[in-house]
Image (cartoon, coloured by chain):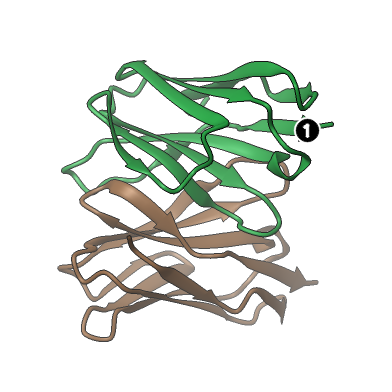
Amino acid sequence: GENVEQHPSTLSVQEGDSAVIKCTYSDSASNYFPWYKQELGKRPQLIIDIRSNVGEKKDQRIAVTLNKTAKHFSLHITETQPEDSAVYFCAASITGNQFYFGTGTSLTVIP
Amino acid sequence: ETGVTQTPRHLVMGMTNKKSLKCEQHLGHNAMYWYKQSAKKPLELMFVYNFKEQTENNSVPSRFSPECPNSSHLFLHLHTLQPEDSALYLCASSQTGDGTEAFFGQGTRLTVV
């Protein structure tokens, strides 16, 4: 099956700085890459996603980039705020089936 | 509410007990999943059902037995569990073919004593 690796496992940034989380995947057939945010005690929720026919997608302060050739994709959060503190998961999927998740990044934004 | 509902929210069971976790989705999705979330493996895929048919069993021990009677309901039957099975069990659903997100339930926090 698909193998998704995610780095770093923990990340601390000062409020207002940028945060970058990187993931790699192994199955070249994967074509859908969502990112989830999980706050303490809550379920994972989608924050942004990208499909394999797109190289970059942006939604306000968050953006995702995809390099199909290298099989890696990244999450970028700009102007970080304390409420961005959470665990972030990347995932890889083939047409919305069998989502395989990375090991998560615990982001702490220091006020 | 998310459209994916799990019950119970918390469960404590002994190693000789038999219990079941329930998941229900009201989103019209055709695929449902069980994930195990623990400190060691944050989101570990256990089972996948597409159109009620099991399409993935990710090397899960037989003490976990899934059941999918229809595309809206998913169960996880538990028996003779071990303390290391204590974790948060998350159910999710998605619509395959569209490449859309998986929606998660709130999870069941399971403690095996």
Can residue A76 be seen at all in this image of the molecule? no
Residue A95 position, x and y percent, is: 20, 51
Quarter of the image where one finds residue A82: bottom right
Q: Identify residue for label 1.
A: B111
Q: Residue at x 23, y 76 (%)?
A: A55
Give whichever of A104, B68 is nearer the camera. Answer: B68
Is residue B25 depicted above or below A12 in this figure?
above
Residue at far bottom of view: A70
Percent x, y of residue B60: 49, 43
Residue at x-position 55% and y-position 52%: B43
Residue at screen point 51% across, 73% down: A6
Give the chain letter for brown.
A
* Residue A73 appears left or right of B2: left
Q: Colour of chain B?
A: green
| SS assignment at label 1 | strand
In the rendered image, the vertical position of residue B97 relative to residue B1, given as above or below: below
